[in-house]
Image (spheres, rainbow, N blue to C red):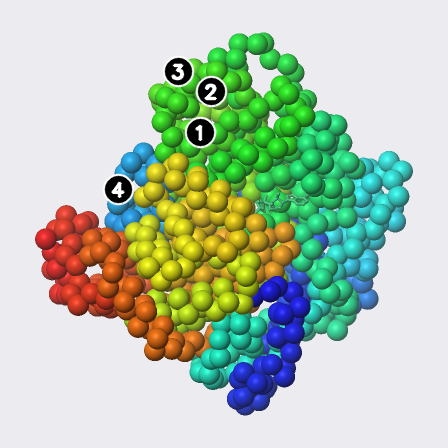
Amino acid sequence: MKPGPLVRRSRAIPVISRIFPHKFKYQSLGSLKFEKRLLQEQFNIRKIWGLELRASNGLVKDEAELGDRVGGLQGNSDNDEVIGSENGKCSIRKRCRKSGKKGELDNTGKQGGGSYTSDWEEKTGRDRGGDGDEMKRERNGVAQRQGNSDKVEVACSENRKCKSEKKRRKRGGKGEFDNMSKRGGGCNTSDRKEKNGRDTGGDGEKMKKDGNGVVQRDAMVKDDGYTGFKELMDGDEVVDDDEGMEEEVMVEEHIDILEKGSVAQLPPSSPGRSDSYLSDSRFDQCSISPWSLKGIKDAGYEKMTVVQEATLPVILKGKDVLAKAKTGSGKTVAFLLPAIEAIVKSPPIAHDQKHSPILVLILCPTRELASQVAAEASKLLKYHPSIAAQVVIGGIKVAQEQTRMRKNPFQILVATPGRLIDHLQHTAGFASRLTGVQVLILDEADRLLDMGFRKDIEKIISAVPKQRQTLLFSATIPHEVHKICDVALKRDHEFINTVQEGLEETNSQVRQMHIAAPLGNHFSLLYTLLKEHIKDDANYKVLVFCTTAMVTKFVADLLMKLNLNVREIHSRKPQSYRNRISDEFRKSKGLVLVTSDVSARGVDYPDVTLVVQIGVPADRQQYIHRLGRTGRKGKEGQGILLLAPWEVFFLSSIKELPITKAPEPIVDPDTRKQVERALSHIGAKIKATAYGAWLGYYNSNKDVRRDKHRLVMLANEFSRSMGLDNPPAISKKNLRKMGLQNIPGLRSE
Ligand SMILES: Nc1ncnc2c1ncn2[C@@H]1O[C@H](COP(=O)(O)OP(=O)(O)OP(=O)(O)O)[C@@H](O)[C@H]1O
């Protein structure tokens, strides 16, 4: 499907009514949703340029406290919010969060239990060869409804003077556009300078960030009619009774905003600008070295992205930063560039390269992401002949990395946590090299601080100096993470948020749909959706996310047998294979990559046209990050979440996102037959491992595992969907591990 005009055109009512003739029945609901969408678009204006300032909770002095804090802390209930409103005034309002209500529905608990073959291996020892690790994940949706009492959200609209903000900043100057952060540091001629009273005579070029103002849809339809994938993505919203609660929340938000008196007064938006990921500031307006500037220029970057503009000056000043910005918005350069500058400014070191200190340490949750970050660093270091980056990740021989580190001097190390610990424990001199760390960076910080990685991160933090600069970046930072990030960050760190809390943490140019259909239809539906997308867009580039590594393998095999151009990537593949496939997908078009969560975070595949997620994602964050593989750098994209009816509980954890329900596509009988035939050609062993992995994955989901009998029934439904008459047998050991002994319907061996 072509991006851009097609999507816009398809949002027009005539198309909607053609596809969904019953829409007028739901006109009133439709206008409600319309209004919410409009507000969301308008909020974007402030969201992007809004600033969230948070006084930090204070440094946790003893890093061992971390564990207690994760378990014990609860969010506070109030938020102070400064909202741009009419007459250009800012109103400050206490907002009582809905703690304990809707937002807490299904994402509060830790997922435990169950060994399964998913891709969380990087955090659980799979890097080190572990199989079927016990998975423990912390879900976090509660955080979306809980606030910190000390959080002040500043969000003033463009072209309005925000009085409280002005007062707070106590500055003169002409920069009326008041919603950038209060921070100093390097940039010369942007408005921020004026705001910070640091104007050095620049012309104070005014920031222009508009909402995109394109009101796309205004109707909701209850209809099962489906005329094709294109219509599914381009057509209108569909709402049924299940969404009643969602509507209720919309009404609340609607009233909320009306109370602020800001609906009518929000500034008109300019199409195409609200989601612009680029700012108006250029890199050469910042005090960064000419060598870095040359590297940036060669990389093709001229203007800073919004998150780069917001964070660079603060980081250059040496402050600790916790930064949240949408997927694909340039966070990597935002932390790499100032880190390189820190090295440029650091005093020269005696030339004993064997023991020369590591000055910048960057941690990433997956191998692919670590490699990508190291590659981006090398790009920026092109004109820094004496600075180099290296990467250490699982899946590579430790000895090989030791030799590489010994032979080639480097100051920047990018690592996955497990492998870094390996080197700490087994590589001579490595621990002493880490004592030189001046800048510690946690990319995908919320993932690294969650339960799966926590112990490793604690160890690593205790191996680097306390006197350092720490930068935490992610597209999702739940409130639990705010609480525990103090273990890494200094008391006076700044939280820089370029995404407004709750509303649209996803890119608005990505259209999101969910389909609820019985498991037995999923493979035929997937094939139908892919075929139609491929027919629609010759430049298609699709990511299909599956729940576990072995389910990924199974789905990839199936799609290959159906003659689609398919590759697979997951933890059960050797690293060299993963690298090759990842590179191929990065460069290709006309390809479907079936993947587990190894591709969920950070990986920057350009021009992905569609992201399909089959089955319930691990949590809200994972949904957002997976979806974020499309719609990068302001481009358009599409996302489909394919759920079984009993999985729709997950939707309550993403209810703030603009995801709409699509009718179940009609699968033609030929397609169904093709899929059945392809299924019959897949080996029993692959199906058996997929079945075991599926069972393990859902057994780790607190919402599903509650009723073990039902879980087994559902697993057997999955088994039938793979074309098996009888569910495969599972080893007694695995059944015991999952706590599923003696549950009727399971076969053991
Ligand atoms: N200033 C810039 N101008 C143009 N392109 C940029 C700029 N900075 C970064 N990019 C490009 O934007 C793309 C996305 O960047 P990056 O991968 O850092 O996003 P991200 O915010 O880290 O996303 P995610 O949350 O998914 O990890 C990359 O292709 C990168 O090369």
Instruction: Assign the N terminus to one quadrant of the image.
Output: bottom right
Image coordinates of residue 117 in percent, x first then y, are: 29, 49
- Identified by mark 4, the residue type is Asp
Distance CA(mark 4)–CA(mark 2): 29 Å
Image coordinates of residue 264 in percent, x first then y, are: 75, 73
The mark that comes first in sequence, 3 or 2, is: 2
- Identified by mark 2, the residue type is Met
Depth check: give the residue in front, 149 or 327: 327
Mark nearer the viewer, 3 or 2: 2
Residue under label 3: 428
Residue 71 shows in the view: no
Q: Which image quadrant is residue 11 in? A: bottom right
Q: Are marks 2 and 1 in contact (CB under 8 Å)?
A: yes
* 647 displayed left or right of 210: left
Residue under label 1: 392
User: Is disc 3 placed on a helix, strand or loop?
Assistant: loop
Distance CA(mark 3)–CA(mark 2): 11 Å
Distance CA(mark 3)–CA(mark 1): 15 Å
Residue under label 4: 131
The mark that comes first in sequence, 4 or 1, is: 4
Q: Is residue 350 above or below residue 666?
A: above
Image coordinates of residue 224 in percent, x first then y, are: 44, 83
* 512 displayed left or right of 128: right
What label sits on residue 278 in the rendered view? none
Distance CA(mark 4)–CA(mark 1): 21 Å
The residue lying at 71 percent from left, 72 percent from top is 263
Mark nearer the viewer, 3 or 1: 1
